[in-house]
Amino acid sequence: MLSPYGMLSRYGMISPYGNQNRYAPDMSAKSKKGTHILPLKLYLGVGIALLVLTATTVTIAQIPLGPYNLVVAMCIATIKALLVAFFFMHLWFDNKFYLVIFGTAIAFLGIFIMLTMFDTMRRGDIYQEVAKPFQPEAVIYEKATPDTTTSHDTTGVIPSEHK
């Protein structure tokens, strides 16, 4: 009985001698052309930038800017998303077309979320129906008069005046 490694190497799926597999194409020429290994200090720099931007978001949230707190928070969140996409997803070093398309999509997503939040935050200023009931004469809005002559009855019998 063969081990899993033996079965895979027997059928040519893996080879103990490197990429000498007759079924898999040799990718060494293509991979050397597009390979980029980023230095550790770049990853650490982007990570530190993300932490600084997170601390900035928390600090700015404590400052009362009114509706502009949302704008600042969404701008910082969009910048953080772009940093992750550009460096951790390696879009900065890939085809620039992908960088532009993905960066534009993230930027517009942030803009659309900001516009949607502005709309939902200010909706009460425009629509006065929010401040008052739709049917003021509805039964639910009738004022109940306190009845001091009767106490709470736990027998479950409805008094004749409420029938």
Image: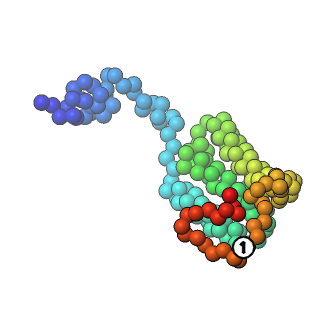
Q: Position of residue 117 (x, y in %)?
A: 75, 53
| Residue at the spot 63% in from the left edge and 55% down from the top edge | 80
Q: Which residue is mark 1?
A: 147
Return the x and y of residue 139 as percentages of the image width and height: 76, 56
Extreme residue in the top direction: 22
Taking the image as shown, residue 73 lies to the left or right of residue 156, namely right
Residue nearest the observer in this picture, 117 or 136: 136
Using the rendered view, name the quadrant where residue 163 is placed: bottom right
Does any portion of residue 48 appear in the rendered image?
no
Near-viewer residue (45 or 109): 109
Which one is in front, 110 or 126? Answer: 126
Where in the figure is residue 35, as x and y percent of width and height? 50, 40
| Residue 57 image position (x, y, % from top left) | 66, 65
Q: Quadrant of residue 45?
A: bottom right
User: At x 33% / y 31%, what residue is drawn?
Assistant: 19
Residue at far left of view = 1
**Quarter the N terminus occupies:** top left
In this rendering, the answer to whether 102 lies above or below 67 is: above
Q: How many marks?
A: 1
> Would residue 150 appear left or right of 129 to someone viewing this image?
left
Q: Secondary structure at mark 1?
A: loop
Residue at x 75%, y 64% (from the top left corner)? 69
Query: Mark 1 is on which residue type?
Result: Asp
Q: Residue 99 vs residue 108: left or right?
A: left
Q: How is the image coloured?
A: rainbow
**Residue 37 visible:** yes
Q: Residue furthest bottom?
A: 148
User: Label 1 crowding class (10 Å Cα cut-off): few <14, some 14-19, many 20+?
Assistant: few
- What residue is rendered at 59% in x and 43% in y? 91
Of the pair 96 and 4, the residue shown nearer to us: 4
